[in-house]
Amino acid sequence: MSSDERSTNDVMVLAGEQSGDVHAANLVKALAERVPNLRLSGMGGQLMAEAGVEILHDIGEISIVGFAGIPRIYPKLKKIKKDLLRRIQDHKPKAVIFVDYPGFNLSCARAVRKLPNPPKCIYFITPQVWAWWKGRARTIADVFDLALNIFPFEPRIFNELGGKAMFVGNPIAYELRDAPSKESARLSLGISMSDKVISLLPGSRLKEIDSHVDAMVDALKIIHAQSPGLRFLISEAISLPDGYVANRLKSSGIEIRAVRGDAAKVIRAADAVVVASGTASLETALLGVPMVVLYAGDIFFYSLVRYFLLQVDYISLANLLSGYEAVPELCQKQVRAQPIADALREVLMDDDVRARQVRAFERIQNTLEGMNPYECAAAHIAAELGYEAQDALHE
């Protein structure tokens, strides 16, 4: 059915976790400015609700910590999927916009396409098919009318498989456009520009903290014994219980200042960062601070991923985007005090090592910075649904 034949102005938006709620809320705000009379409903959280989305299923119902929680919420996800499909069949929205959350969203999108007269299916923030299950790339190309990517090399993957994909900019790069300078970050933290500072970013989930923080702190003890004048910071994500990270530091024997909910400031204030693999490594690269990346987790899951599912040579986005090992990566048994201290000392003290990292980060910055991903995605969605001419995207 063409967009002209489908009279409804309903659009459903599906996000499945806190980060997706943020991205979806920003997207629907931009989309509503272009198409003011849209009626929005879907799965999400408080931010989506505040942006005008009628929340049919709250993401609080399906929140989990780690992979061990998946079996617990599976029956709930199955029930939600069944209800959403019924609503789509009954109310015939013009489009369903899927945001991140690939396991559920891909399953749901495949089912939507099997409905009679299905709506447009649009994916914003596609899964990293170039790193993980490559079969997902073909599924996305086949199932979705439009895929909106946040890395510039991704559209080619889907387009070569017959899909329709576009790069819309990177939300992390866009969010960091107003990040504080090193000077202002240190001023707000009461740190002198003459101080040498190391920052720790152990992760945003309890399991990540438990896997990384003790080795990180023990590495700082080694560094402190050799260079007692260094200053130490650690980021405590707002997704963690208040004081959880700070309480882990009480018996450390060295002064490590915990800063809650302002990772960009903690990174920018540093001369070197030790960071758990994930989006924080990309954030650190975009802020231009030399780093060491760690990954420690469940040994069974890591072995499964490393030898059967992972399709790339690196675990950090900084290295994946660089195409080579621009930053040191320590995995599993390497996540111990001495290896971290050795890698950190080199990153902190060796000017050539630091310069090589900074050059790599500048290339990443040049690739990702500049575009507003939400405005760009909204423009492409509006055009896909027939609300705007494609020519308007280039005005």
Image (tube, rainbow, N blue to C red):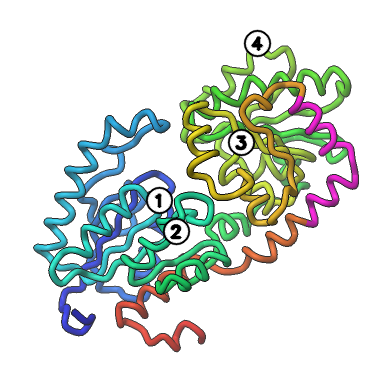
Magenta stretch prevailing secondary structure: helix
The answer to whether residue 103 shows anywhere in this view is: yes
Magenta stretch bounds:
339-359
Tell me the amino acid under the disc marked 1: Gly
- Callouts 3 and 4 close, C-beta under 8 Å: no
Asked if the stretch drawn in magenta spans residue 348, the answer is: yes
Residue 378: where, in percent of width, then height? 40, 71
Q: Mark 3 packing: few (<14 Cα in 10 Å), some, or many (20+)? A: many
Q: Mark 2 packing: few (<14 Cα in 10 Å), some, or many (20+)? A: many
Residue 356: where, in percent of width, then height? 83, 51
Q: CA distance from mark 4 to mark 2?
A: 41 Å
Q: Which mark is residue 276?
A: 3
Tell me the amino acid under the disc marked 4: Ser
The residue tagged 4 is: 251
Give SS at disc 1: helix
Residue 27, compared with residue 300, is above or below; it is below
Give SS at disc 4: loop
Dot placed on the residue nearer the N-terminal end, 3 or 1 = 1
Q: Mark 1 packing: few (<14 Cα in 10 Å), some, or many (20+)? A: many
Dot placed on the residue nearer the N-terminal end, 2 or 1 = 1
Dot placed on the residue nearer the N-terminal end, 1 or 4 = 1
- Callouts 2 and 1 close, C-beta under 8 Å: yes
Q: Quadrant of residue 211?
A: top right
Report the front residue among 48 and 103. Answer: 103
The answer to whether residue 167 shows anywhere in this view is: no
The residue tagged 2 is: 125
Q: Which mark is residue 20?
A: 1
Tell me the amino acid under the disc marked 3: Ala
Q: Mark 4 packing: few (<14 Cα in 10 Å), some, or many (20+)? A: few
